[in-house]
Amino acid sequence: MHPSRHRYDVLVVGGGIIGLVTAWRAAQRGLRTAVADPAPGGGAAHVAAGMLAAVTELQYGEQTLLDLNLASARRYPSFAAELEDATGLGLGYRPCGTLAVALDADDRAGLRELHTFQMSLGLESEWLSGRECRRLEPMLAPGVRGGLRVDGDHQVDPRRLAAALLRAAELAGVTFHRDSVARVETVRDRATGAVLDDGTVIGAEQLVLAAGSRSGCLPGIPDHALPPVRPVKGQILRLRVPPGYAPFLSRTVRAVVRGGHVYLVPRENGELVVGATSEELGWDTAITAGGVYELLRDAHELVPGLTELPLVETLAGLRPGSPDNAPLLGRSALPGLLLATGHHRNGVLLTPVTGDIMAEVLTTGSVPESARPFSPARFSLQEQPA
Ligand code: GLY
């Protein structure tokens, strides 16, 4: 065995919001916990808009994921209050609702279908005429043909969420190793720790791989235990509504424009986030003229007045995509290694329940009922009966 300069009950690989919430919850349960990450509090959350859009981002065939998304959305108010109490830091949680609108007849037909699907699942979503949409949000384009009012889809500021989780984890006694993990260590087919880029060896009873889009390629993990996670690029813009400007939007507004999704997330501090592209380009994080153009073109069709606003930031990030768009939570095929990754479009939304689930697995060894469908084992090759 390697000599360990450090030894913990739990080592979390990755200090994004999923790694941080896991570490915080583990430490609260009395586990000696460390996080390895060169820049904890960064990751995909630094780019994300922070929509908590369980109902408006519903996709056909993802009803199982919907249950987890809804459970996490319900958990948000108490989670945000607990985190704010623990740290004194606000999260920018806004129960503001969402309006999904259609700009032409095709979009309207698609939105009608989505509404029927939502109704069949008992979700709260109200169909509005174009006039009713504009009464709610006067900055919308006059051509809006109708929309869905979803009062239960809210927002949080992911950067503030990450900062609060980092602080909460520190206050709970989590140790931070501000370096990258070079490789996971195994002894007799069991994960026993990790070696950092600077050569530091860290031993741990249990490792949690929460490295976002990089989770699928961490050295030292045997192929059969590596999660099938890939990077999915998203470009996003931040505009600023100047102080004193009339309220621009009061809730999240989104639309499908020519088949692409565009959303506008207005924060109380005047920030207006416009997102997002979804591109299968591997590790590329270039901000492209085409990406920025498409976002501004579609957002301008939705809310023409936004071209007057200062453009303050353009960013690209990598969502951790999984084959079924749902996270991998729980034990991996390598004993000692747990996974909390593959959250794809729902990392911010799923942060509260991910923390609860991972704390349960780490302390009791058993996976809560709600998390069973998200076991990493669903992607293992099964022997088919003859
Ligand atoms: N959930 C929004 C996005 O991934 O773009």
Image (cartoon, rainbow, N blue to C red):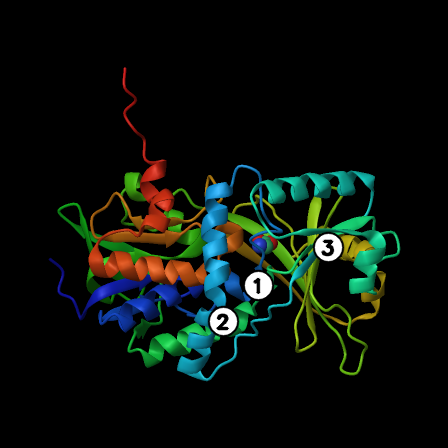
Image quadrant, ligand 1: bottom right
User: First in sequence: mark 2 or mark 1?
Assistant: 1
Asked whether mark 1 lies closer than 8 Å to ligand 1, one says no
Q: Farthest residue toward the left?
A: 1
Looking at the image, residue 172 sits to the left or right of residue 74; the answer is left
Looking at the image, residue 236 sits to the left or right of residue 12; the answer is right
Disc 1: which residue: 50
- Amino acid at the residue labelled 2: Leu
Q: Quadrant of the N terminus?
A: bottom left
Q: Are marks 2 and 1 in contact (CB under 8 Å)?
A: yes
User: First in sequence: mark 1 or mark 3?
Assistant: 1
Work out whether residue 52 can be spotted: yes
Above or below for 36 versus 287? below
Q: Position of residue 340 (x, y in %)?
A: 36, 54
Q: CA distance from mark 1 to mark 3?
A: 17 Å
Residue at 46% x, 43% y: name it: 64
Q: Which numbered mark, 1 or 3, is in the foreground of this view?
A: 1
Q: Position of residue 295 (x, y in %)?
A: 73, 55
Q: Farthest residue toward the top?
A: 386
- Amino acid at the residue labelled 1: Gly
Disc 2: which residue: 161
Badge 1 element: loop
